[in-house]
Amino acid sequence: MKKKEKTYYHYTSLFAFNSIIENKCFWAFQLNDMNDTKETKLVYDQVEKWFAANRKKLKRSNFGKHLSEIFDFTNKDENENLPYVLSLSSKSDDLNQWRSYADNGTGICIGIEIVKQIKEIEKEKILKNLLTKIKKLKDIVRIVNNEYNIGAYYHNKFAVQGNWLGTKVNYTNENNLFIYDFLNSCYKLLSKKLGEEWAGTEYLDNCNYAISECLEVISPSVKDSSFEDEQEYRILCFPDELKEEYKINHDQSLKKRKQNIHFLAHDKRLKMYQKINLGDFIEIKNVILGPKYNGSVYTIRMLLNTFGFEDVSITKSIVPYR
């Protein structure tokens, strides 16, 4: 029996809706253009606190200083490594999102189905798998060379640059110390492994890159609990520039990805975005007209029909908002 596809919802203005239909694509902006000022920071703030709390212990260890070098906090907000994100919600016809994202209820809620499977970012699974990988890293280190390392291998396995991924957002706050537990587990494992004769600098290098990439992969799936009511689902893509750092054969794919980067002058700055073409792996299934939309259903139907969306259903919001 065919699996029933889940519908997610994108709230937007009437102007943006018209552009989406006419151009048959959505725009995915970089993560630092989202409305949460703590985007990406929750995970890395916990890492910084962990290092601060364990500074003496790390300083005494052979690998503590080495481990800390992988976290370049001064560059964690740089655009080059941030993913491009399309924000959706599992909630339809929701008053708060009409207010926040659809011109105070005058816009449109677009129902979207992911019709082709995309890889999911699962925070708990990724953390668990990395610890397993560190345990088994002795065998992998033997095949590592200067052109390829376990950090790149790990990142490509869970977040292939240039490919679109999906993730359900996990809501947390600065008091939720899941990263503490993860780093404590890494510390214990690495302390034990470094007692073995084979484990040297190369092993540390590869473990450090793997830990760093793991944190980079999961950080876009973690948001402050203040936004929990939105029940967000994200479609995202990590930039190909990461491949260049690891010297993987990237020239052709990087050129292709750069061709998909577009620019928008908005709010006194320049934003970068990538297009997600309708039909590639997502389709529009229905649209809901906002509670304060005062145009005709006929006009919306004509727009959809003109650009090949005859099967998309149209309903009006039942939220009593004016």
Image (tube, rainbow, N blue to C red):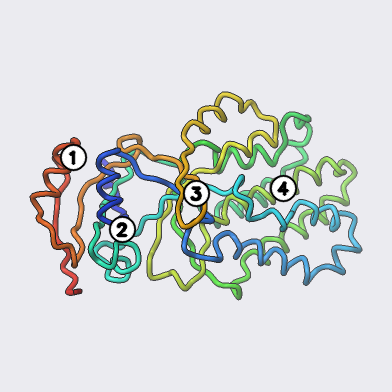
Residue type at mark 2: give it: Tyr
| Residue on which the image places disc 3 | 271
Question: Observer-nearest residue: 235 or 214?
Answer: 235
Report the mark closest to the observer, 4 or 1.
1
Secondary element under disc 4, as helix, strand or loop, is: helix
Residue at 72 percent of width and 43 percent of height: 136
Q: CA distance from mark 2 to mark 3?
A: 20 Å
Residue type at mark 3: give it: Lys
Q: CA distance from mark 4 to mark 2?
A: 42 Å
Report the mark closest to the observer, 3 or 1.
3
Q: CA distance from mark 2 to mark 1?
A: 18 Å
| Residue on which the image places disc 4 | 134
Residue 318's spot in the image, x, y percent?
Answer: 15, 68
Which numbered disc, 4 or 2, marks the residue that appears first in the sequence?
2
Circles 3 and 1, Cβ within 8 Å, touching? The answer is: no
Which numbered disc, 4 or 1, marks the residue that appears first in the sequence?
4
Which numbered disc, 2 or 3, marks the residue that appears first in the sequence?
2
Residue 113's spot in the image, x, y percent?
Answer: 29, 46
Report the mark closest to the observer, 4 or 2.
2
| Residue on which the image places disc 2 | 11
Residue 69 appears left or right of 18: right
| Residue on which the image places disc 1 | 309
Which numbered disc, 2 or 1, marks the residue that appears first in the sequence?
2
Question: Observer-nearest residue: 293 or 217?
Answer: 293
Residue 242's spot in the image, x, y percent?
Answer: 63, 39
Question: Observer-nearest residue: 292 or 197?
Answer: 292
Report the mark closest to the observer, 2 or 3.
3
Residue at 61 percent of width and 37 percent of height: 241
Q: Quadrant of the C terminus?
A: bottom left
Name above or below for residue 149 compared with residue 212. Answer: above
Q: Quadrant of the N terminus?
A: top left
Secondary element under disc 2, as helix, strand or loop, is: strand
